[in-house]
Amino acid sequence: MSIQLVTQSVGDALVTSLRERILADEITAGTAVTEASVATEYKVARQTAKAAIERLVGEGLLERTAHRSARVPMLDEARVRDLYFARGVIEVRAYELLAGRRLLTPEALTAHEAFRECSTNSDVAALVQADVAFHRALIDSLESDRLSRAHSVIINEIRLCLAQVQNAHLLAPAEIAEEHQTIIAAIRDGDVPGAGQVGLEHLEHAERNLLAHLRG
Amino acid sequence: MSIQLVTQSVGDALVTSLRERILADEITAGTAVTEASVATEYKVARQTAKAAIERLVGEGLLERTAHRSARVPMLDEARVRDLYFARGVIEVRAYELLAGRRLLTPEALTAHEAFRECSTNSDVAALVQADVAFHRALIDSLESDRLSRAHSVIINEIRLCLAQVQNAHLLAPAEIAEEHQTIIAAIRDGDVPGAGQVGLEHLEHAERNLLAHLRG
DNA sequence: GTGAGATAACTTGACGAACAATTTTCGGGA
DNA sequence: TCCCGAAAATTGTTCGTCAAGTTATCTCAC
């Protein structure tokens, strides 16, 4: 048995890099992401750039219509509502299932602690990252590839929204940490409806803040 | 205001055609779907075929690892379990929400009637199609693009499983129609936990039948 | 000056050919 | 029979080209 190496094709690396840059708000919403510009920037063929853009369109991180350049989608109210609604459908049921099994993985608890530690300093990007990691860890606990994948797509698009309002301090870290704690407590107690309820409130809270900032 | 024409690029049409053929079990599991074969079959460039294959891989309808040909994934127990689990997370919560709103669209009711009519004759493919249409209509009632999309991906992969056991009559049409009826009734009555419960049982029923056939 | 229409520039859609890297297949030798 | 190396097949990636559609620009009539 030989030792396995982890390799990555140019195309995969390109997608990864672009995704990171988009989620970091380094590629801002509205600006055109043309196949040619990506190709020259990364010194790859236009075909390769095209393929990467198409994959990101599939993930919802870029938008495009025929014969027009791809753009990072603009943050708008309908989008935020739809994203949080879809996310809620998945997460609420997931938390209920976790509570039913009293299932709290070390990963989830570690992610919770990590968020807590992050919440003392004020680096917004790191905070968003830790928050996402916590929710992702809970979903991953159910060990369903398909569910994790569906959740991940939605979460990434939400990260996009959060990135676009990064400057605004619409996050009260301590409060969020507390809400996370109540979710964990409900799961630990096997409180099925409670886990769904506090999970839902946590999401509604975040959605309200985001919408308020969008209008104000 | 000019009249809008519906056009479709070669690539889109190619994806659509391949998807239909895969879901119709015309492209059987295990057989290689090479870029070259698709290109020559449809008389398109290899790049075009490659892009189409990549999109289908993204949908879970094809599987591929680096430098190896894409194949329709093989039906296996873990896959069925994962698919029905993920589907359940989405549909159960969706039915609860529909019940909470007492929301039954004409489309959903029409789809239910269509399935009923289908259930008298014995065309398995049409039956699967009608069943999928019913569940899709219920999810679409929530009018969330993201949720419908996530659900659609999972449903398509389930259709793949059903296609592979098409010969087996693991469906009791009348029974399924009855279960659909109970879901509708629960939603109409605003019975939130009931809607989730009967929805879950309906899915578990289908999953059990599929798993039993897989082993037997 | 302004608006409409023609024109040019830009961008994507699709194709063909080519070469490298990797996997699979196959045939021959121990 | 089993293993190994060569050949074939397949994907990864690039370049160049043309067509088709979109956006910007410019001109000209009013």
Image (cartoon, coloured by chain):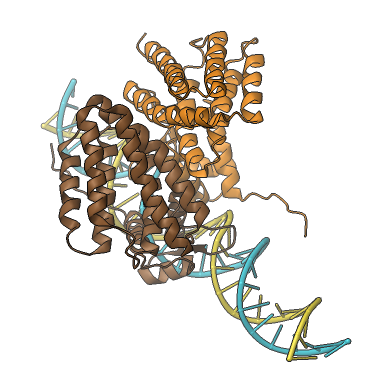
Chain colours: A brown, B orange, C yellow, D cyan
Instruction: Please state the horizontal and vertical placement of residue A167, each as a whole percent of the image.
Output: 34, 68
- Residue B93 in the image: state x and y as whole percent: 43, 30
Would residue A76 be seen by someone viewing this image from the given angle?
Answer: yes
Q: Is residue B58 visible?
A: no
Corner quadrant of residue B17: top right
On screen, residue B19 above or below A133: above
* Identity of the residue drawn at 57% across and 40% down: B16
How many badges with numbers are in the image?
0
- Say which quadrant the N terminus of chain B sits in: bottom right
Residue visible at 46% across and 61% down in the picture: A214
* Viewer-nearest residue: A150 or A17: A150
Side (left or right) of C12 relative to A194: right
Side (left or right) of B155 relative to A132: right
**Residue A144 on image: x %, y %:** 31, 32
Residue positioned 57% across, 14% down in the render: B177
Report the quarter where the C terminus of chain B lies: top left
Counting from the top left corner in percent of width and height, residue A166 is at: 34, 64
Q: Quadrant of residue B2?
A: bottom right
Q: Quadrant of residue B208?
A: top left
Task: Say which residue appears at 48% left-offset and 60% top-offset.
Answer: A73
The residue closer to the viewer here, B12 or A112, is: A112
In depth, the one of B112 and D27 nearer the eye is: B112
Q: Is residue C6 left or right of residue C29?
A: right
Q: Is residue C21 above or below residue B159?
A: below
